[in-house]
Image (cartoon, grey):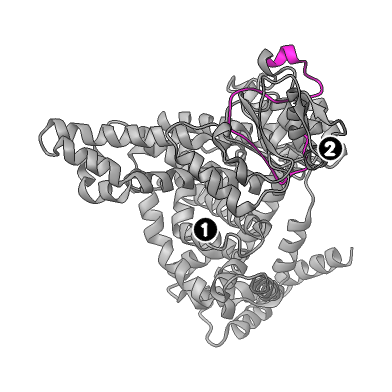
Amino acid sequence: AFDHRHIFLDPTPDAAASLAERERLFALPRSSWDDYDRKKISPGGGVFARSAKSIPLGSQARALLGLEAAAAAPNEIIRAILRLPVALLWNGGIGTYVKSRHESNAEIGDRANDAVRINGGELRAKVVAEGGNLGLSQRGRVEYALGGGRLNTDFIDNSAGVNTSDVEVNIKILLNPLVQAGKLARGERNRLLARMTNEVAALVLRNNYLQSQAISTLELKTSARLAEYQHLIRALERSGDLNRALEFLPSDDELAERRKGGAGLTRPELAILLAYSKIWLNNHLLASNVPEDPYLSSELERYFPAPVRQRFPRAIAQHRLRREIIATATTNSLVNRMGPTFVPRAQEDTGAEPAQIARAYTAAREIFEMRDLWTQIEALDTRVPAKLQYGIAFETSRLLRHVTYWLLAARRRELQVDAAVAEFRSGVRQLEAEIGQVLTGSQRERYEKTRKQQTEAGLPAELAARVASLEAHNAALDIVEISTAHRVGVAEAARVYFEVGTRIGLDWLREQIERLSVEGPWQAVARTGLRDGALRIHRRLAERVLARKDTGTAPARVTAWVEAAGEDLGHWQRTLAEMRAA
């Protein structure tokens, strides 16, 4: 380790003793590496002043640093530390220590560290964490990431400090009028603030967690979705919301090169795109009436720690910054869970405004009780592979995308979140409870296969079944709606619906649509149109079966309908046979 005063070397540390000593130093009112107990340092190590002309290196230190000389200048040792092949490189101080090979020291603007700075391609740490600001230049981060390094950006990694200040200030804005009105004593207010310290920390760390999770989920598909990201970058540039060059996002030529090599945007670049998309969406929501939606008042309540929620619900509802808090919370949920391209693409696909999209997304999330599912998945941290969790998060976003579009198509003008939840949530719960019994054909096979895979991967049986059902739930709102229209139970409507899909080949057709590879946003729009068209046809045909009022099992009712349809259905079946043979 090093700071502006000392270099600390411990070639073969005793992990327990080292941790205890660092905790002792941390607890001191003021401390430096010079306060470290030398008896706790392994042979060949020590604490050395950076002002020394030369630092002696024992064999253990030379082996650690990869240096051959018996002594080295402090700056040479620091460069060697930065290049070490370690699990984690932590930056927590002042100064920029890593740049890109394409940048000069003069461009970095930190003359004090010119002598120790290295290039991103020289870093050999598996992970870099940025507790400090500007420890790496953005281009240095990207260079390191393109070489396989794992990192975010400083504004992602150290955002907890700013976020904590925001929450603290908003709590004080809430409580101060109560103090001034004599409804809360100042001493009690101060004690309340102190009691909430740990919960505020948990709320802030939750935000950190979700932002990092969002970037990791985006990273899973970064090469496949490169054209979408490029489309978003161009759109934000056209609207004046983003300066690509200023943020060191790749040019179109650079993106073309990455596409050829099968690469996408790096985590630092995804972080930039995530931030700008949040700013863009937040501005749109603030300019709308979304913050006035009664259902979204729950976002305002969730923002505050439990003691405040329980004691001062009326004051929360009257908070001076209630609109800003609701807009920010809605933006964070939408962009963290759905990605930066979702709202702009939904605008292009549906013609809806960002406010309408936000309402539809919120309704979709609440109808399917996704918060509960996400909590269960996140509770498996360190127990199942992170990649599995990110994959499930991506699948939930696919379902929410479809349901959001469905609501925009069917309920756009009159869409109210509370009304949509009241209309559909109960029916979706009923479908969830019966899903394993109502699926048929290849869709049932995929459900059982996914359920088995998820169970073997470590998911509890009930959770594995819920994850396996996500694909089938694309049809959930259609099924609930037709069950209401035809006055039959949700399970009965579902059995007929899925039997129709199996019997006349619509399941197979949707599988083929999903397998279509897309290059760019417009091909993605075309695929979405095909998928939605197939679902609309599926719904109409299921309704025709239910409208006949036949009795018996779902297979028997579908058989009766197929026989009655005759040549009308025969043409479709011949066309489908030709498609399968092609």
Q: Which mark is residue 66?
A: 2
Q: Is residue 102 above or below residue 92?
A: above
- Horizontal side, residue 315 vs residue 300: left or right: left
- Amino acid found under the numbered disc labelled 2: Gly
Dominant secondary structure, magenta: loop
- Horizontal side, residue 476 vs residue 75: left or right: left
Helix, strand or loop under label 1:
helix
Badge 2: residue crowd in 10 Å (few <14, some 14–19, many ≥20):
some
Where is residue 455 drawn, in percent x and y? 64, 74
Q: Is residue 556 visible?
A: yes
Magenta region, residue range: 83-110
Q: Residue at x 60, y 48 (%)?
A: 18
Picture quarter containing residue 569?
bottom right
Q: Residue at x 47, y 28 (%)?
A: 283
- Amino acid found under the numbered disc labelled 1: Trp
Q: Which residue is mark 1?
A: 374
Picture quarter containing residue 52?
top right
Query: In the depicted view, which residue is nearer to us: 190 or 559?
Result: 190
The quadrant the N terminus occupies is top right
Helix, strand or loop under label 2:
loop
Picture quarter containing residue 439?
bottom right
Kindly give the residue lying farthest to the front in the view shown.
Answer: 39
Query: In the depicted view, which residue is nearer to us: 139 or 445?
Result: 139
Q: Is residue 486 above or below residue 15?
A: below
Nearest to the eye among marks 1 and 2: give it: 2
Kindly give the residue lying farthest to the left in the view shown.
Answer: 182
Where is residue 521 drawn, in percent x and y? 71, 39
Work out how far the residue at label 1 is from the one at label 2, CA to CA, in angstroms. 45 Å
Q: Which mark is residue 70?
A: none
Query: In the depicted view, which residue is nearer to us: 426 or 18?
Result: 18
Q: Is residue 99 magenta?
A: yes
Q: Residue at x 50, y 72 (%)?
A: 431
